[in-house]
Amino acid sequence: MVKDSAASDLLKNGSTGARPEERTETGGKNLTLLSKTDLEVLSSKAVSLRRDILTMIHNAASGHPGGSLSVIDILVILYYKVMRVDPLNPTDRERDRLVFSKGHACPALYAVLADRGFFPSAYLEQFRRLDSPLQGHPDMRKTPGVDFSTGSLGQGLSAANGMALAARLDGSPRRVYVVLGDGEIQEGQVWEAALTTAHYRLDNLTAFLDYNGLQIDGWVRDVKSLEPVAAKWKAFGWHVLECDGHDYALLLEAVQRARANRGAPTIIIAKTVKGKGVPFMENREEWHGTAPGKEDLARALSALQ
Amino acid sequence: MQETTATREAYGQALVELGRRYSEVVVLDADLSKSTRTALFAGEFPLRFFNLGISEADMMGTAAGLAASGYIPFASTFGVFATGRVYDQIRNSIAYPRLNVKIVATHTGITVGEDGASHQALEDIALMRVLPNMTVVAPADGYQTAQAVKAIAAYNGPVYLRLGRPKVPRVIPPELPFTLGKAQLLRPGRDLTLVAAGIMVGIALEAAALLQAEGLEAAVLNMHTIKPLDGDLLLQQAMRTGAVVTAEEHSIIGGLGGAVAELLGESYPVPVLRAGIRDIFGQSGTPEALMQKYGLTAQALVQLARAAVQMKSQNSKV
């Protein structure tokens, strides 16, 4: 289930400074639910996208499989059920936007954008090659559908705030989504930006934390712990939701609750598994930035049916 | 009496004008709006002004997001905080995606004065100049600052505009048009060329007058746009005069002097002597005392000019 951290004691006693009337409506009303067919379609879509991710990284002989596999289900719910985007008009001013702040996991983003028709699937074979439209980290000037260039960690939330302020200045209902890595939020700029989102009450912005618990050098809790992470975001004035980041029904419910929340931004702390879907990659930091060879690719693809 | 204005004051006023004309102009600051004079814009357009507090990295990223959504953000703080402190944010979130962000730094150079080395940006031109897609502008006075603000707003791409703290005399003649990337020949001369930017333009003109008294005719080139450098006019002057002295309120490494030496070294080698801070940090003091101490005076330029002319005649004997 989606755990609504806004209902915790921290908020109730007012220690975060958030005003009670701005708390979320969480009655479960007006929520669009996923049908059994929807779930089947999304699940089979995700299997095929996971295969694309691994094939892409294998072909490039470099890239980041672990975080791509942990974040892909978040992108699936956003690009197939939530975001209003038009692949034929990728720079439409009124589109919803995604800042993919953990840019190294871009194989997941590229697989989704190709499948949605932002560019031909043949591009995926060019990932990380010379003169390719698909760079090693997202480049908004080279890849249709990429809303912001990322790669140097910690910078995406600031840019997303700028986009959310722009939407407000335009008087537009468009929304801004940002995907953060868990190791990424060790960067100080994220917390500068988190203050900004809350200060300007940017409730048109929703962040996802891809909380897979691993970074290059090992478990996040061992390298430099983020805990208690939900309490930190609450203390920064955010509306915080927590859910399983591989469960489409829960992810969709969380997004809808985020949209209904007024006066504060929402972060959805999505508990994920690094390498999700490929048993021998799951929860293994060595698959953060290593491309699968021929044999490993075959093993992985046989697990993804 | 000579008209004097701080370039930052001219910036604040020009921003308000710009705000009235273009609804897409927005302004960001990091808790220094009274000093950078963006407070003038904030007063008239409170909904288009964003104070990010003391978090310059976040300010640059926020500006990038606004630019990516079609706005024209001007982001201001002191030179040290507008460049080195936020280098990776400018590199990756602004310059690399070629976003239309105007970084306007006030309090650059040694004339920051009493605040001392921690606050004196002496390497900002070098840091910005080396970034692909970045345009670097250092106007000579308040009048030119107002012109430059309009010009960079009309240009689509990232710009670093370098302004200062103190009042500076008006040196740009009335009606002299400003074009990005086009240097201005403020004074013709046949013996050498003084190439200056920012507040050194006025000092170079003073030096040229002193040199004339001793029989040397110095041309004065206002290289207000340091990147892209106006290679055509620079080459033409180098060919005509055969010796160059550069003058900037900045390190002699990587700034205007570096740019001029790089270009001439590759296309028309002539003696190039550089006035500027000689690879050291600054210190506290009055702006006047510091300019004196670090050789940023008309007298110091005169000495370099004599030396450059002498080198030229030595070269021609070989």
Image (cartoon, rainbow, N blue to C red):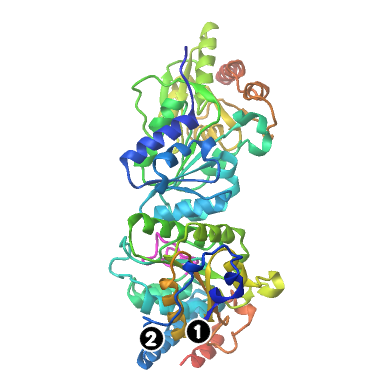
Q: Residues within 10 Å of mark 1 (few under 14, many from 20)?
A: many
Whether B31 is drawn above or below B299: the answer is: below
Main secondary structure found in the magenta portion? loop
In the image, B112: left or right of A89? right
Q: Position of residue B198 (x, y in %)?
A: 50, 28
Chain letter, disc 1 residue: A
Q: Position of residue B68 (x, y in %)?
A: 40, 56
Q: Nearer the viewer, residue A26 or B301?
A: A26
| Number of residue marks | 2
Question: What is the span of residues highlighted in magenta in the rendered image?
Answer: A128-145
Chain letter, disc 2 residue: A
Q: Residues within 10 Å of mark 2 (few under 14, many from 20)?
A: few
Q: Quadrant of the C terminus of chain B?
A: top right
Q: Which residue is mark 1?
A: A246
Residue B181 visible in rendering:
no
Q: Is residue B187 a member of the stretch shown in magenta?
A: no
In the image, B222: left or right of B17? right
Whether B196 is drawn above or below B317: the answer is: below
| Secondary structure category for the residue under label 1 | loop
